[in-house]
Amino acid sequence: MVRELAVRGKKSARARILRLLYRVDLHRPLDPDLVVHGAYWNRGVACNPAAIHAKALELVPRLRHVWVVGGRHVGRVPGGVEHVVAGSRAYWRVMATATYLVNNSSFPGGFSKRDGQVYLQTHHGTPLKSMGLDQRRYPASARGMDFGKILAHVGQWDFSLAANPHAAEVWERVYPAAYEHLHLGQPRNDRYFTSTPDDVAAIRASLGIAPGSRVLLYAPTHRDEGAGHFSPPLDLERFLRETGDEYVLLVRAHYFHGTSAGLAKTRPRVVDVTGHPRVEDLCLASDALITDYSSLLFDYACLDRPIVVHAPDWEAYRTTRGTYFDLLSGRPGDTPGAVSTCDDELIGLFRDGGGWDSDASAGLREAFRARFCPYDDGHAAERVVRRLFLDERSPRNGSGPGPGPVTRMDGLR
C-alpha cells in the first residue's frame, strides 16, 4: 500500500511539473511549419489524418509532421514517422507550439488552444448512430460521457470535415460551435480511386488469399455492451460451411477489441484482419462487405461493390443507441444493398441465386453512393491540404457521385 501511494505521488508530481512546463511553452512562438496529428484516441497513424499527412508531404514539403500516440501503440508507428507519446514532455511541447492540429477524434490531456493555432477535426466516418449531444437521449450509450468537456473540445475546432451533406447536418447539430464546414470529401477514401488491379492483387497475396477466391469482408461495429470479448452476431463457421468453398471471410473486429478478434486458429477460410493497419486495403481486397452499423459501409460504397447489411439486433440497437435513418427500410438512399436479420437469411443470400449481388441490390447501392459519397473522387486529400495549409479556396464537388472507381474486381476472379 505504501509503495502504491509513493508511485501515485510520483506520477502526480510529474504531471504537475509537465503542466507547469507546458504553461511556459505556451509563451513560445508558434512554429508556422509544425503539424500535429492524432487518430482514434492515440492509436497510431491512420484514417483521414494519415491521408492528409501523406498528401501534404507531396504538396507542401516544408511542413514538419508529428503524430501523437499512446505508449502502448508506439510499435504501430511506421518507420520514419516522427511521433511523441501522449502525455510526455515532448507531447506538451508540440501541442504548445504547433500551428496546425489535425485529428479524427481528440487530443489527450486538456490542452489549451492558442490564438494562431488552426484545428481541423476530420471525424472518422459518416454518422448512422446518434452522436454528440444527441446521445443524451440514450442513457445506455452515453454512460460516463461528459458533455461539458465535449462542447469545450468542439469549441476549439476551426474546421470540421464533411464527408457528405448528411454528415455536415449532423455535426452542426450535435457539435454546435463556430467552426467552418469543409465539404471536401474523406481523404482516406482517395485510395479507392487511385489504386490499380495490380495493387489489389498484391494486397490479396499478402493476406494469403488464393487466386479465384471470392473474398468477403465481415466488419461488424462495436456494441456498447460488448467492450470486452469479440462476439460477432454471426455464426462464422456455419456461414462458411453452408455457403460453399469459394468464399474466404476476412474478419475485422472493431478497434475497441484490440488487434485480434480472438478467433480459433484452425478455422478454415477465415482470416483475422483486426490488426491490419489499413482497413482501406481490406476493402480493396474484398468482393463484398458484410456489416451492420459500421461507418465503413459509407466508405465502401465508393468502390461500387456489393454491401450486405446483417443486422439481427436492429430494433434493439435503434432503441438503445438511436439512428438517423432506417438502414433496413429498403428505401433508395437509406439501404445500401441486400439485408438479412438472421443467419439463415444471410446464408441464403450467398447460397441461393446470388441475392447478395442482384440487380436490385445494385440499384440500392447506386442511390446510397449518390447520397453519401458525393465529394469522393480521389482528390479529397489534395483539396484539404490546399485549403488548410495553403489557404486555397476551391469550389466544392458537384452534388453527384465522383468518377467511378478504377479498382473493380472483375478481372481478378
Image (cartoon, rainbow, N blue to C red):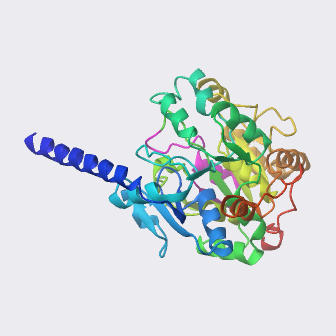
**Residue 373 shown in magenta:** no
To which quarter of the image does residue 249 belong?
bottom right
Q: Quadrant of the N terminus?
A: top left
| Viewport quadrant of the C terminus | bottom right
Q: Position of residue 230 (x, y in %)?
A: 49, 45
Direction from residue 194 to residue 315 in the image, left or right? left
Residue occupying the point 79% across, 46% down: 372
Residue at the spot x=76%, y=45% of the render? 348
Q: Position of residue 217 (x, y in %)?
A: 66, 56
Horizontal arrangement in the rendering, residue 45 relative to residue 372 (left or right): left
In-front residue for pair 180/142: 180
Residues 62 and 288: in front is 62
- Front-most of residues 29 and 166: 29
Q: Is residue 346 above or below residue 32?
A: above
Q: State yes or no: residue 241 in magenta.
A: yes
Inspect this view and state whether residue 330 appears. yes
Q: Residue at x 69, y 57 (%)?
A: 216
For the magenta stretch, what is the residue range? 227-252
Q: Is residue 283 above or below residue 296?
A: below
